[in-house]
Amino acid sequence: MDFIRKKLDNKIHRNRLSGRSADAAELYRVKIEYLLTLIFAYLWNKNSERINAESKKEILEGERPSMGHLVGFIRHLDVDEEFSDFIKVFGSKKSYTNFRNKTIGHGYRFDSDLFMDDISTIYEQIQNLNNPFISRKIRMVTIENYVDSNSIGTAFSADSLEPEFFSMKDESQSLKINNTYIQYEDEYYRITPFIQIKDEESIYMYCNYNRISGTFVYNQLFAYNAQITMTWGEFKSVELHRTKNLRTSLNGTISNVYENNYDKDSYIEISNEYINKINDFLLSNQSNACCTIWGFGGVGKTATVQYVCDQLRNRKTAQFQFIIFISAKDRQFNPVKLKGEIEPTTDRVETFEEIIKQINLIMNDNETFDVEEVMNVKEKFLLVIDDFETLERSEQKKVIEFTKRLNVSTQKLIITTRSSHIIGEEILMDELNKEDTCAFLYDVIKREHKNYVFQLDNLYADEENKRKIHQVTSGRPLFILHLAYILPQKGQEILNESLLNGQSASEFLFGRLFDYIVDPVKETLACLVFSCSSNSLTGELELVKLLKYNDSNELDYEYEFDDHLNILKKYKLISVNKDLDTFSITSKEIRMRVEDKILPYLNNLDEKKKVLLKGIKEYLPTSISVEDAWSKYLKDQEEYQSVEDIELSYNRLLTRRGIPVGTRLRSLTNYYNYLKTQNRQNRSLDMLNKVESYFEDPTYFPYYILKAQIIAEVKKDTKEALILIKKQVDKQPSTKDYLLLCSELIYYVIEDVAKMAEEAHVKYNETGEITRNEYKKLEEEYKKEFQYLMETLSTILTEYLSTVKDSIGEEYSESFRRLKKNTRKLVMFLRGTNIFPEEEKQKSISFVTEFFETIDYLLDEYFISN
């Protein structure tokens, strides 16, 4: 007899006295099925490790057992034949199971007196067996606390329906909190998780369980249609057999014993995307024997792959005969500490030899360094190497060579790593988004800190708090767990800090990150940081290229530079805005660590480059581009640097690809003006040849104006300059450009006509080098040139100026000013020359004066007054 049967007897007695036969019969049914469950629970606790694997497998696979199944389970577990007579009763033709199947299972009327008599007779038959376990008084205990080496709880006696206080000296804490035990023959036997007592009214008996999740479904004995669920870790991923080194699951899969990196279901639900990818690789992929799962620290790589391994071990049918999880992890971040702490790990492997020995220990029961023995295994196996990047490079290479020998059909290898060096198929694990981050945090808080759920609901009412939660954790499950631990202690203010900036978290995430990056990429990262201003995390990509690749052809380095940026983006060290051609360092912490560990890579770079870069950075805030800032910096440095250094910088700047055309022209103008101050203007002709291809746009007329100026001043060839300008005028450009070109045309016509007239006069009148006919021919040539100018000015008056009045804007200002200036020169030239007949001369002066006054009026009307 025990407390529960005593309670049931009382209820049966009251119902029979009240004539409620159906209720009494139902309670008899419950009493018999409870007794079956109690015996099963007692025997499982006592003998589960004493039965053979097949019997244990049959029991554990019975997730939804019938009464017949329970009798079979008891038969397997009754090693000492304590219940042989009981089993015979339930095995007879008049047994309860047969009666139940024929009556309750087929619509028998509970209110029948015959039913009442039959089921009570069956129970009396069980009572008359005089089985000690059934007949003796059994005390039941639920443990609620453990204080000063004492197990504290509530006792339920067969002699009383009132619970009693329980306390027992238990230095080894053999009785577990929230577990229910029976005291039989001076021993305590655990009947949890099959029967669970919370208090005298809350008594639960299991009806089914899930052997993957360890979740049990219970019926409440003294309540109508009431069910609850509870999860028990020992029944999660249950095993047939376990030793120190290996375990065998119900489906026959053999694996090594390792500590799981997860104990919650919520993140696994969120990460189904990655679970599906891993399963596809393992069960469907026939192209690769190896898969690399890589991502930043704390995103759940280890937890996810362990979860997949557990799923495989608990499937109905084995997919792999062996699953071997090997960890190279030498440290881990403990989120259940106020500040988070890095803790060393144990049982890690450090060499390829240790990996092979572990594989052989599990698969061949022989801890030898024999690769051939591994390769000769016929059964399918899955090998996982966790934190692969912590192995020495030489050991990594041995593993990579090993992967080349794997049979894609029967041998699979999964590698987890923070390094982007991919072996086989690639699965990149990323951080959680905002919604998944908040869902995961809520689930953990609800499980671990129920009293804080109300405050969390209030936090979630404000979307800004959700954004902060995602920001401070970066969506990494490890740091979401950390936040779940410290949020109830520190409160909402912790959301204004970054959990990743703590010393331990920072070291865990970034401490070794730079070891995974090859030197050329490290140099690029150093250039990125150096290119940022002192208090900024952003910079211009062109500056970085300038610092690292200044002397290289862009076509040679562009692909390499993009590749380096992609690697740094994968490691979440930078982000890139291609539209703006800018970058951002992910955090101040990363910048500080780069400055400590990587900036020495800049020692290999030219000091002059670094000086130049610093100068450019000063001008960037007021410039439209890096090259524009460079041009301004060079202009201001002309007095302070050597001619050779200034020329070299101008050459580098002017021959760079992709510079805005206006910046290149402005730099070319500055360069030419600088050469004139140094009496080295002849060198500008070489530069014209170098930059000509960058001004391929035939409509970019300002370049040709500068080119004409250089030709006229350096080569002293106004004729060539004039021809160049005339070609541009004849292209019929826009009004603004046409006016600008015509102002230059006036200048070069004056220069060339005066020069031709002077040359003709000297050669004919003074030296006699030419004949009168040749003189007339020269005279006709410069008059024709002058006539071309007059016609052009007339076109401006009649066609351009008459239509431009309503659309004159500031962009015309320079064209009008230069036109006015050179028109004044033309008037003065005409008044001072005698190369034209007087009547023709006066007519030209009158026309040009009218032209000048028109330009002057427009200037005054539209620009000066404004």
Image (spheres, grey):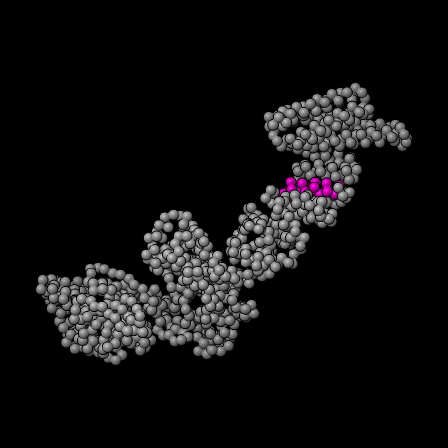
* Towards the viewer: 534 or 220: 534
* Residue lying at the far front of the rendered structure: 148
Image quarter in which the N terminus is found: bottom left
* Towards the viewer: 324 or 621: 621
Can residue 24 be spotted in the picture? yes
In-image side of 547 versus 302 (left or right): right
Spot occupied by residue 864 in the image (x, y as percentages of width and height): 63, 27
| Residue at horizontal 50 percent and vertical 74 percent from the top | 354
Spot occupied by residue 598 in the image (x, y as percentages of width and height): 58, 59
Question: Magenta region's main secondary structure?
Answer: helix
Residue 89 falls in image quadrant: bottom left
In-image side of 781 versus 107 (left or right): right
672 in magenta:
yes
Q: Which residues are magenta?
A: 658-676
| Residue at horizontal 17 percent and vertical 67 percent from the top | 161
Residue 116 falls in image quadrant: bottom left
Can residue 89 be spotted in the picture? no
Spot occupied by residue 504 in the image (x, y as percentages of width and height): 47, 61
188 in magenta:
no
* Residue lying at the far bottom of the rendered structure: 80
* Residue lying at the far top of the rendered structure: 839
Q: Is residue 735 above or below residue 92?
A: above
Image quarter in which the C terminus is found: top right
| Residue at horizontal 70 percent and vertical 40 percent from the top | 669
Residue 180 falls in image quadrant: bottom left
In-image side of 291 versus 721 (left or right): left
| Residue at horizontal 44 percent and vertical 60 percent from the top | 339
Q: Is residue 171 above or below residue 204?
A: below
In-image side of 116 versus 351 (left or right): left
* Towards the viewer: 750 or 583: 583
Q: How many marks?
A: 0
